[in-house]
Amino acid sequence: MATQVLTSSATPVADPFPINGTDYIEFYVGNAKQASHYYRTAFGFQLAGYRGPETGVRDRASYLLVQDKIRLVLTSALGPDSPIAEHHRRHGDGVRDLALWVDNCRASFEYAMAHGAVVVTEPTVLSDPDGEVVLAAIRTYGDTIHSLVERRNYRGLFLPGFQRVTPRYQPSAVGLRYVDHCVGNVELGRMNEWVGFYERVMGFKNLVSFDDKDISTEYSALMSKVMANGNERIKFPINEPAQGKKKSQIEEYLDFYHGPGVQHVAITTDNIIATVGTLRDRGVEFLTVPGSYYDTVLDRVGTIDENLEPLRELGILIDRDDEGYLLQIFTKPVEDRPTLFYEVIQRKGARSFGKGNFKALFEAIEREQAARGNL
């Protein structure tokens, strides 16, 4: 199966499931207060809102973090019998909700239901003096959901029930701008099932496909298909393991997450050198590639605007497609289970996902797996 780029974003097509962008990403975590401190200190998010017992919510505490167009919600259970607590017991800290911003929640929900979606929450109106938000939710792979968020009649901070907070400690931002894509890992043989789900239920298209010849090393391999909505503001690569000599990173994830889930979130920046330098200084750990990668990378990608030396020093990878080039780097897992990690990406015209870096990246991941005894 050759790598393929299908529909261009410039092609006028009727979008049966219009999405404006990522509304928020909600994580279920063991200790939201402490996790919020990590994301503020290390990643430069601002604590903007809170929902919990002090605001009349008895079963959970949620912290709203923002940076430019990115909204993260960190939620913890307040008791051991909550579904939130069960999610955390099974998966550890992980993504529960990839929420999508839509103009008409009811219409989007009805379309999804008519095409085979499994309901989590029927359309529900939440209101306060700042207006109303309409929310519904459907299931996707594993225990992950998509909330559909209609906020055209809301003037408030985020959602009804959240209280604005202005803490004294607000570290400066690091230049993260918006969510570029979110990658899901699913079991062997189920990638095409979830590709079909996004095509059928939400009108997505298969933007790019990679097989085990594209994404492989001496020891392991995986397959991936990138699903995108009509305007390509939402991109969901779906990975499954492929046959290899040793355990792939996808199998390791599935073992430790105990099922399918979000493997990594890619976030854009306009200055990756400054952003990654600041993140590293704040304690964020990144995967590294051998210095020899940089000896020949410009022969492969051609001329770039940046000086190569700071890219080499920080370990930032480079790749090019027909429309430009990109710069990217991947963190190590951000918790003790080898599950969720982040990608920082700067696009200089490229719409692709760094195919030329796959081998170097996956060898770096395998070195980390071997150190954990999981390769």
Image (tube, rainbow, N blue to C red):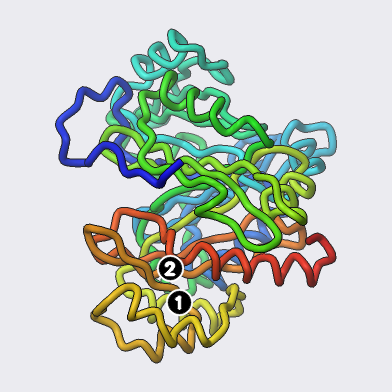
- Depth order, front residue of 161/177: 177
Query: Which labelled disc corresponds to residue 338?
Result: none
Compared across the picture, whether 35 is left or right of 301 comes to: right
- Depth order, front residue of 223/373: 223
Q: Position of residue 84 (x, y in %)?
A: 72, 37
Q: Farthest residue toward the bottom?
A: 309
Please report contact status of discs 1 and 2: CB closer than 8 Å, yes or no. yes
Residue at 51%, 77% in the rendered image: 279
Residue indicated by mark 2:
328
Residue indicated by mark 1:
316
Q: Position of residue 343 (x, y in %)?
A: 49, 62
- Depth order, front residue of 350/91: 350
Instruction: Reply above or below: 7 against 193.
Output: below
Q: Position of residue 3 (x, y in %)?
A: 40, 47
- Classify mark 2: helix, strand or loop: strand
Q: Locate the C terminus and report the quarter of the image it occupies.
A: bottom right
- Label 2 is placed on what type of residue? Gln
- Depth order, front residue of 210/139: 210
Q: Earlier in the sequence, mark 1 or mark 2?
A: 1
